[in-house]
Amino acid sequence: MKHKMSILFYVKSSKASKNGLLPIYQRITINGTRIELSTSKFVEKSKWNTSAGKIKGNSEEARLINSYLDILNAKAYETEKWMVNNNLEINAQTFKNKFLGVEERQRKLMVIFEDHNKRMKELIGKEFAINTYKKYETALSHTKDFLKYQYNLNDISIKQVDIAFINDFDFYLRNTKNCNNNSTIKYIRNFGKIVKQCYVNGWIEKDPFLNYKGKVKEIERTYLSEDEIESLLNKEFKIKRLELVRDMFIFSCFTGLAYIDVFNLTKSNIVIGIDCKFQ
């Protein structure tokens, strides 16, 4: 984002000291918004050069104070240069914080993501299913791996997440993690929920997902023939675990129950009906 900055030194007559000296202030204007800072220096009104923003003459007092004002002037431009080089947004508040050494609270992506998942875990069975929680945990793991792979970082500011970050994450999931299109989109959408919450909370100025173009592709589901089911029924496994998996799958085929319903099935769910058969 482009910005315009100007610097001015001036004296405040309204804040004259008891001995008549006027305080010197530094005014930094960024995009029309003023930042007024005291220099902690004072001068007699007759000695101040308003147009030059300096003390008149070559006295020892003039040289010392004018030199100090030059240092403050240089510091302002150095602050501006540092913020530009680090791709930071420059406005009156962010500039003032950096110039004065006030650390702005940085909201970190991984901290926010982990807090979201922690809250989701506590609401399992109330608002969320355990499988939904597991999907977000997987998305969190992929995001951590991506940060380490792409930036060699454990966390970043949420403000650094832009469309380029999202597209790089998308490519990483497809290329490095070998995720198919639909899995990639689902992980990106889980990640996107975290980013959108940051936007709603006012922690970022715009939603970087507005220009993300990923789409889930429709998949044509195939089904097993009667012969294939029969073959699977008669298949002998040497490993008990595989037999159990086979039996659960066949049970789902015959009952129409989804995997999650079979997973949550208990003995209390199975009763003898009026036809004397299990239901």
Image: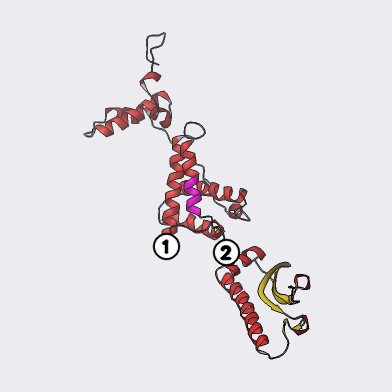
Query: In the rendered image, which residue does mark 2 sit on?
Result: 102
Write down the quadrant of residue 223 in the picture: top left
User: Do callouts 2 and 1 mark residues in contact (Cβ within 8 Å)?
Assistant: no
Q: Name the spot of residue 64 as percent of width and height, x first.
A: 63, 85
Q: Residues within 10 Å of mark 2 (few under 14, many from 20)?
A: few
Vertical order, 260 against 106 (above or below)? above
Closer-to-camera residue (220/99)? 99
Mark 2 vs 1, N-terminal side: 2
Q: Residues within 10 Å of mark 1 (few under 14, many from 20)?
A: few
Residue drawn at the location 70% of the way across and 69% of the way down: 36
Secondary structure under badge 1? loop
> Is residue 264 toward the left or the right of residue 159 in the image?
left
Task: Residue lying at the far bottom in this picture: please name it.
Answer: 58
Q: Which residues are magenta?
A: 107-115
**According to the image, label 1 marks what residue?**
152
Q: Secondary structure at mark 2?
A: loop
Q: Amino acid at mark 2?
A: Val
Q: Amino acid at mark 1?
A: Asn
- The residue at the point 70 percent across, 77 percent down is 42
